Amino acid sequence: MSGHYDVIVIGAGVTGLSSAWWLARDGKSVLVLDKGVVGAEASSRNGGGASHYQSPLFAEEQRLWPMMDDLLGYPTEHQRERVIISVTQHEFEHYNYIADMCTAMGWQADKIDGDTARAMVPIAGDNCLGGIHLRFGGHANPQRTVQAYAWALQDLGGRIIQHCPVTAIETAGGQVTAVQTPRGRFSCGALVVAAGPQISGLLAPIGIDVPLMAGRAEMIVTEPAPLMRLGGVDGNGLYGRQTMRGNLAFGGGPHEWIETQAEGPRARPTTPLSRSLARRVAEMFPKAAHLNVIRSWAGIVENTPDGRPIIDRIDNLVIATMSGVGFGLSPATGHAVRDLVVDGTCSFTDIAKLSLARFAGLAPDWRENAGWLPLVSA
Amino acid sequence: MTRIHDPHAIDGKIAAPDETHDIIVVGAGPAGLAAALEAARAGRQVLLIDEHPVPAALAGSDVPLWFGGRASAALQAPERLIETLVESEPLIAEAFEAGIDVRLGTTAWGLWRNRDGSAALPDAMLGLSDGQRSWTAGFGELVLATGARDCALAFAGWDQPGVMGALAFQTLAQRYDAFAGTRVVILGSGDLAVETALLARERGIAVAAVIEVRDTVQGGAALPDDLPVLAAHRLIRAEGGINGVERVIVAPDGGAEQVIACDTVILAIDTVPAIELAEVAGAAVVTEPCRGGAVIPGGAGEVLPHVWLAGAATGLTGARALAEAQGRAVMAAALGLGSDPVTVADGFDRMAYRADWLRALVATSPDTTLVCQCEEVSRADLIGVQPPGYLSRPERMCARSLGTLLEDGPPDAEQVKRLTRAGMGLCQGRRCREQISLLLAMAANLPPKAAPRGNWRVPVRPLPLAVMADWDQAEKMDEGWDVWFGINTQWIPYRDIGTEAEQRHMAELGGNMHL
């Protein structure tokens, strides 16, 4: 296998695929390479949230999500709005602070009392103190959405090769010229690296240091509950949603820092943390506490030292990591990456603070200093 | 140098097991009982658990076996069921007498150990439940004698009460004395089917027919002369009424349809080794057609450090004495007292037999036949990788299929599951995973041995939130609990980065922003 493409994207996760789709919409010939299968990692293992008001990409995300089913041609299960409920006074005050912050940013968030919350969330209990109702944001089905990007990309002529890890990046005169894989060499006009935790290992050999640390996070899901008016309900220290099928899918709590393998995680185990997740879901939804948990799973996500994305262009190379918060923002992330590749600058928002250069003076032992170290097995 | 602690990380937060035993044996079937007794004879402390009798609600969901709505009201009286269960298995009484801590109605729903991707546990541990609460249990050695489960294959009319698996039938008829049918049709003619027929007759249940899709009877055991065996026959459909199955329609190859009255159809084509706990603990899984499909490499013996597998869970079939002998041998090995246990496989290609049956059942059933009953996914939608009915199917979606996915690479059972929802329901794919695996292999022109498979996840039995919940959790679990990674700069509104507001948000929110 070989060939030349206007743009090669490494990583068939939600960020890489959205970027590839945006570029293909622009008429670019695009090749996406992945070590495994489309959306096999964190892109399809997350809570499906799409309410990341802190991001400079958020306004564009909000504009795009309601159109995504039509733009992609495949269902994403996107639903608008969120309710965040509390069962402790601390949570109540915390969520109210968030509401004030959102309102100050121009995103309307209503503070609701316990009765209002119970009316909106019939499986909430007498212990619910109220919460906030975000009149923005929402959620979608991660697995369905990531496949939708892949299919929409293919419908535009883009190509995806699965089980095809990139083993080396070739450069000449400061420009990326090609990538090598076990299945051949592919040359390109530009390269987008959106390979999650594997970004650092891919770029180190060409002298680019991307500080990332991978962590493992867990979720649980129940059998279906009767559909609520709004599926985007969480709180009590959890993130998640009721799916359109009715299942309650939630995660949260402690993560585990892990070593990154060049070939990807060898396993994504869960732990008895799932029992603490079950407890918090049962506290949040006492009237659903009888529902069976039917699965748990873990996903591996990369984090930058400040937890903020890196979306940056260096010559004809674009680096895109969302630091563990990529799914919901993906419609806008792809747009930003497209802009960087094609125009050299993001057309719709300022992303200067997401540059790689902000880590230029980072101490080499930043992971140790933050306590972001893998555990040593007992 | 002192290691800096990330207060939001899992380090040290998973508590030690609530109880610890020298030896734990999961499964009080022949292999598990023999293993437990062997350990007790060697003077070791043993906990022996078995999930039977299972709660009526779980049985109604076809977990762990495919009960097919043919359990009698006896399931509503668990105390009586325990008595029946003990009466049906003399070795249980022997185990009690040997001082073994025998707990019936206790389920092992999780097994965790440190391995690639996690080092967060103070010890390997099982997740146990008695239906009211759950807890964790550590062990010196763990023997998984978890047996097998039913292998379900869909046909027209299979999604009604009265269609069930052979192991569920054995459990209801023999161990629970709670089978509600009176006249059965048995699919398959191997040893499993013969055992099923003989048990039915012993219990006074009429065997209306034994149907075999291949040209000849498959089992090695002698069939009673008066057993109505129909070889080279196809099952066309099952028909019924409000109480489920009332008759099946069968036909010889190329011949006329025939109606057989019955209230139950028992699939006795094959069983599937119950590898759930070993798989979720990190054991490799391989497909070995002669051992019953997806199994743990190596068979009987130590499959993970201090975790041993014995009996039908390894793919062992055949006489009870074989399972008992293997259970004893595995325990002897686990205690360092004996040589390696022998794995027995008779060379019969079980997956080829399943595939023959499945092809015949596919040929006689419309492609609207449900493959996944929980999520109501038809065979057409599975192979078309179409979304569930509550989603729209725009033109481009309809044009997609397994065929277009195969252009991207080999079939991936997890990917197809996520797109179609097949296997994502309450029975945790027990009624569909083997047939989905074979259907995907057939559609991709792969041999059964290369069939893609979906994996098992904890909890390996459906477990209510309130039961799974750790209500006694140590305080340290809540310390530093946050929604995501607890990185206090992560959630600062972009415009506030580098301003005075950033400091205020960090002080107020910490890393505990909301997604």
Image: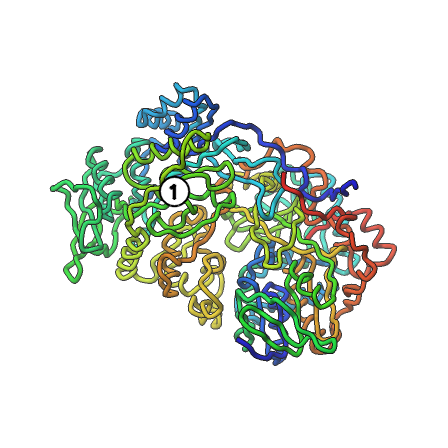
Image quarter where the C terminus of chain A lies is top right
- SS at badge 1: helix
Residue at left offset 62%, top offset 56%: A261
Q: Is residue B89 left or right of residue B494?
A: left
B385 lies above or below B239: below
Dot 1 amino acid type: Thr
> Residue B22's spot in the image, x, y percent?
51, 27
Q: Is residue B183 left or right of residue A140?
A: left
| Mark 1, residue position | B314
Residue A135 visible, this orientation:
no
Residue at left offset 54%, top offset 53%: A243
Toward the viewer: B472 or A51? B472
Toward the viewer: A161 or B164? A161
Q: Quadrant of residue A92 in the image?
A: top right
Residue B385 visible, this orientation:
yes
Q: Is residue A121 left or right of residue B272?
A: right
> Residue B149's spot in the image, x, y percent?
37, 43
> Residue A268's spot in the image, x, y percent?
57, 50
